[in-house]
Image: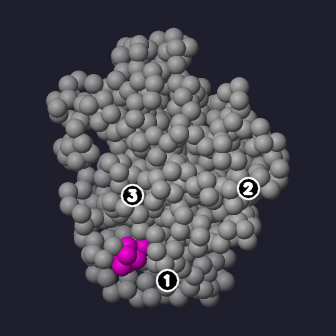
Amino acid sequence: MIGDSRFIAFDMGAESGRAVLGSFNNDRLTLEEIHRFLNTPVKVFDSLHWDVLQMFQEMKKSLDICVQKYGPKLDGIGFDTWGVDFALIGRDDSILGYPYHYRDKRTDGMMEKAFSIVPKEEIFRITGIQFMKLNTLYQLLAMSLAKSPILESADKLLMMPDLFNFLFTGKKVSEFTIATTTQFYDPIKKSWSKELFDKLGLPFHILPEIVSPGTVLAPLYPSIRDEVGLGDVPVIAPACHDTGSAVAAVPAKDDKWAYISSGTWSLMGAEIPKPIINDSSLKYNFTNEGGVNNSIRFLKNIMGLWLVQQCRSTWEDEGQSYSYSDLVKMAESAKPLVSIIEPNYEPFLSHGNMPLRIIEFCKNTGQPVPETKGAIIRCALESLALKYRWVLEKLEEMLGKKITTIHIVGGGCQNQLLCQFAADATQRQVIAGPIEATAIGNIVMQAIARGYIKSIEDGRELIRRSFEVKVYDPGFGLEWDSAYSRYLEIMEKTVGL
């Protein structure tokens, strides 16, 4: 099947990036983190940006470290990142300004302006993508309405992983899974939507060619190869959207499973053969994003562990430093199911004082106010689990089948308390792991592209052999049933469906 071979996965998250070396040996895949680095947004005046040149420098440093340790031979390099954000490239191949962060406020009110030109129902009919103000479509509309000189002079738009593919190869293309996060890809026509761009007055010529996950793009750019001391190595587009790579690594066996890619966001859904674009998926604001092997990731975005991350950050700013395991222990000691929040409540989206926002949410919805740090964290985690139950019910309704197992992958699967809450709230078995799903999926897709693995099914079998998982069985559910009824009332009051 595969001999000894090594691949580098660059996995970029909202807080940090890392280079992970995947080695195939004795019919197993092993991982080694070569280098980890911060990915810190930069505020310039009132705008929030990504420091892409610093990321680029750290990526080259990662390759240099790998060469120093293992020599100049690599079988592939692949990049995955979060969705929706992009860079604009000029005719001279220069990067036109620092890319904006999806939490930047320039998209405030942009969905409503878009709907005044193209009805919401029509945008969904064309794209099948859930409505979030951070989507690429509304970022571009904000630039267009502001008559941005950068947009007017742009030659190409590259999503974040596409930008890194370009910087390392000189090739300007967009990979399918990341392209679908924009809300201007048409999954029925399988192309960018010129219709939508024309109606919104956006420049269609900036959109690049779309390639499939598992495409060998080009060799590493000669100057980078010489700088880091690598031999000839291909840069490969895996599933360039991090959730696409994470779902590729779900060690599932049948078709009765759902996944939660758990991290800053919780992306919960199912892998299906074709998009579901109808009144129900519009009503529940589900999304149809691209997957590997010609699949669709039918899912819902949930705020995720961002709630906990921002609580920790706020307390750290106040001089109180806690590890995530400290926070979980504090939550375990708090009284269960006292107060509930809606994780997707819009004010929770931006950076800021999350503990205060949670307290104010509880106060404004007539609930007991969490009085300790442990109570605040427990409230956030239990509310996430209740949101998972709601998404599960809607998934089953729209898929027309019962889901028996929930696979939780990614860094969030290390939160054992959340995993048990998820099992209890949904009354489904939860299988947690692998932790490094995104890097694993990235590497497996590279190996498929090189012909070292035959198919995604063989890749998932390899993952089952190579990595341990932890099983959580549901406990007694009556208290969770009562809490879920309260959650539904709170959800209707705060965000509707």
Inspect the magenta stretch and tell me whether residue 281 lies in it.
no
- Tell me how far mark 1 sits from mark 3, CA to CA: 29 Å
Left of 100 or right of it: where is 397? left
Q: Residue at x 46, y 69 (%)?
A: 277
Percent x, y of residue 252: 24, 56
Residue 421 visible? no
Disc ID at residue 243? none
Q: Nearer the viewer, residue 17 or 95?
A: 95
Label 2 sits on what residue type? Gly
First in sequence: mark 1 vs mark 2: 2
Residue where numbered disc 1 is placed: 487
Question: Which range of residues does the magenta coloring cover?
Answer: 391-398
Label 1 sits on what residue type? Tyr
Q: Residues within 10 Å of mark 3 (few under 14, many from 20)?
A: many
Residue where numbered disc 3 is placed: 296
Is residue 356 shown above or below 3?
A: below
Q: Nearer the viewer, residue 42 or 96?
A: 96
Is residue 70 shown above or below 376?
A: above
Give the image quarter of residue 364: bottom right
Is residue 44 shown above or below 124?
A: above
Residue 198 visible? yes
Percent x, y of residue 482: 41, 88
Residue where numbered disc 2 is placed: 201
Label 3 sits on what residue type? Ile
Please state which of the two labelled residues, at mark 1 or mark 3, is closer to the viewer: 3
Q: Secondary structure at mark 1?
A: helix
Please state which of the two labelled residues, at mark 1 or mark 2, is closer to the viewer: 2
Left of 5 or right of it: where is 16? right
